[in-house]
Amino acid sequence: MDAEGMLPDSLDDVLSNWDPSARDGARKPHVLYTVPTGQNPTGSTSSAARRRELYAVAQKHDLIILEDEPYYFLQMDPYTGADAPDAQPPRSHEEFLAAVVPSLLSMDTDGRVMRFDSFSKVIAPASRVGWITASEQLIERYSKHADVSTQGPSGMSQLILFKLLDEHWGHPGYVDWLIHIRKEYTQRRNIIVDACEKHLPREIVSWNPPMAGMFHWIQVDWRKHPHASTKSITEIEEEIFLKAVDKGALVIRGSWFYAEPDAKHEDMFFRASFAAAPSDQIQEGIRRFGEAVRESFQL
């Protein structure tokens, strides 16, 4: 992965050189699961060009794409600095919808994309209601699976959302809400990035301001640690994490998100969230995390 998420060339290389004997007999995959917008934990968002490249790899290797887009409408204006004026809101619903990065589903010409959407990230976390969009053939298979597994979301949640969206807001009101919540998340993103600029030692800490979602992915250059020659990356990561916890700041260890925990990793990351905490707590949390980093690195 990079700042735009999954690397199509890397995916193509893995699939083109798939060796079952080197992967405990696992067959070559035929399903790709991806969160291309505001990915958790990295916060990365794939550009339209990157998505087209990824779709081309899926065509080459005949992959079904599961496009999980809970953060799709939490796309933000670019971060332009701590003292920059707020971006102007869209002048119309059409302008707002035209500004979001096109989804993989919109590029699908083969019926190989199933897109997942959710109300949990844009209306209410406890709603537990989402929907899927896909070709008729995929929907038929999914429906049969749902009949013998999840069956359906909470009836109460469905009724509440129906009343809100159909009878109270309507479609225009829902888009108005999406525009509002995009502004709120943009402000939160700016607060956490501003705090990082102010409180984190830039000589060892780096980041890319997220363009969507609710997560900030922070890289720490552990090779500059005074004990890098005698401690492992995991030991240094744990030391920083525990120091931050002792100070009352919970910034999640990046290693907890590895798909293959036993694989060798050369980079250290921490994930921070700006979804729920008030602005003053976001700033204070980053300040305390910065203290933990400085103490660990003896700065």
Image (cartoon, rainbow, N blue to C red):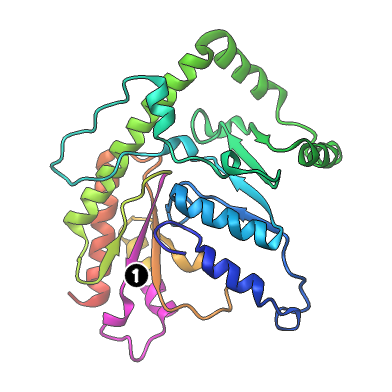
Q: Which residue is mark 1?
A: 240
Range shown magenta:
214-240
Find the residue positioned furthest to the bottom: 230
Q: Is residue 273 left or right of residue 125?
A: left
User: Is 46 drawn above or below residue 224 in the view shown?
Assistant: above
Please give the name of the residue rendered at 60% of the width and 41% of the height, measured from the top-left corner: 105
Residue 205 x %, y %: 26, 67
Q: Amino acid at mark 1?
A: Ile
Residue 123 spot, x, y in % from top left: 50, 28
Residue 42: x and y in percent read: 44, 57
Q: Is residue 59 left or right of residue 275?
A: right
Q: Answer with left or right where residue 143 lies relative to residue 290.
A: right
- The residue nearer to you, when weighing 58 against 138, is 58
Q: Quadrant of residue 101?
A: top left
Residue 232 is situated, as x and y percent measured from the top left of the image, at: 41, 84
User: Of all residues shown, which one is farthest toward the top?
Assistant: 167
Q: Magenta segment: does it hold 266?
A: no
Q: Which residue is at 34% across, 70% downward?
A: 240
- Front residue of 119 and 80: 80
Mark yes or no: residue 259 visible.
Answer: no
Q: Is 220 contained in the magenta span? A: yes
Q: Quadrant of the C terminus?
A: bottom left
Where on the picture, by quarter, is residue 57? bottom right
Image-quadrant location for residue 228: bottom left
Measured along the vertical axis of the image, is residue 280 above or below residue 91? below
Crowding near the residue tagged with mark 1, few <14, some 14–19, many ≥20 C-alpha atoms within 10 Å:
many
